[in-house]
Amino acid sequence: MKKLLIALIVALLALLLSPGVEFHFGGEEKWAEKSDFSLSPDWLEYVENVTGMIVQMPNPDYLKSYESSLENSPMIQLQTYEFTEKHLKSKLKKLAGNGVKIQIMIENKKYQQFKNSYKELQNYFSGLQNIEVKSDEHLPTQYLHSKITLMQSGFWIQSSNLTHSTFAKNREHLFRSENPKVLKSLHTLFEKDRKGEQLLASDLHPNLIVCNLNCRAVITELISWAKESIIMQTQYLNDPALFDLIAKKSETLNFKAIFSDTETNQSLPDYFWPHQVRLMKKPYVHTKMILIDKKILLLGSMNLSSNSLDNNREIWILLIDPKLIEQFLSEFRADWEAIKHLSPTSKRAKKI
């Protein structure tokens, strides 16, 4: 009996150590074993129901709430494309003076920039030992376009920059949560980006989508997987592969999209049915939201462009909380109805 037991233990150990065998001990543990950013067929099984709150902008009064969320934290980490909001800069200066350690990463060479916010921040915070301002020049990405705010016990993932327009003019969405696993992953991501270290697949929580690492694969998979509906509110859509995929899916399921009413998007109603696409002039659509089958909601910094998918540092979070999904749906419907109905002048409409 003793020999049989020993033999069984040896056999089990050999099986466990076999490189070709995977065991489902739980999402976090199995995900931590990943060595690359390829998607496994069952990757959605490891997505967690991350709870929190979604805040829709514009809402000038919410700037105070955002600032208050930074209080009582001994450290703050910001990663953003643009930071010009004067009240928030003043708030950070005060917190740093009170001993809070603050680290800021910001894009140094914005697209068509008329002023260098990185240098402006360096000058504004000069002489304060508790604030470090660092650019993205050492990263193997084109633009640092991600927008996250990390505290000791919570985080924000945003579609928005830290500007006056975010709170007062734009349609934006910000997500706040205290989920410790996601927070830990975001801290790791921030620290590695700050130091210029290589990110590993095991560094990313299963709910996080990070460009230029896993975002094209995830977005393509989710859109391909959609069976009932795709609802999106985003600044624009100009990645050729995603455009073709979404156009094809829009013919077989419920597709609705709100884009910013800009020259770049004027042709979009010509490629979709009139009841599928609307352009929104005010507030300016800067948010980046996609809802798949009313079950999976994506929120974050990534535009649906080739540059965002393949070259930039971008961060999205994947949410499956029914309450958050219903909130977004309600806000989307309100914007959809508020937009003046498009007249049926698209190329498709003329064929009817």
Image: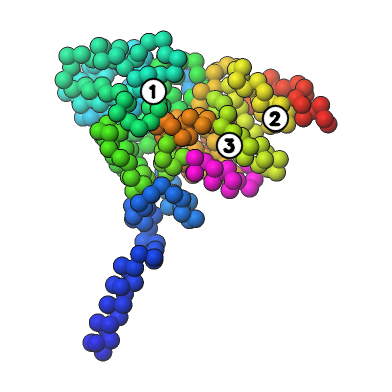
Asked if one can make out residue 128 in the rendered structure from this viewpoint, the answer is yes
Q: Farthest bottom residue?
A: 1
**Marks 1 and 2, how far apart in space?**
31 Å
Q: CA distance from mark 2 to mark 3?
A: 13 Å
Residue 141 falls in image quadrant: top left
Front: mark 3 or 1: 3
Task: Give residue 11's position: percent from left, percent from top.
Answer: 31, 77
Q: Residue furthest top?
A: 114
Asked which quadrant contains residue 311, the reply is top left
Query: Residue 255: where, in percent of width, then height?
Result: 66, 37
| 181 left or right of 251 in image | left
Residue identified by numbered label 2: 271
Q: Amino acid at mark 2?
A: Tyr
- Relative depth, front residue between 222 and 71: 222
Question: Please, what secondary structure does the residue beneath circle 1 have?
Answer: loop
Asked if the magenta segment contains residue 291, the reply would be no
Residue 104 place in picture, x, y as percent: 28, 24
Residue at left offset 44%, top offset 18%: 111
**Residue 81 has which mark?**
1
For the record, the magenta segment spans: 216-229
Contact between marks 2 and 3 (CB within 8 A): the answer is: no
Q: Is residue 285 above or below residue 313?
A: above
Q: Is residue 217 magenta?
A: yes
Residue plotted at (27% across, 34% down)? 196
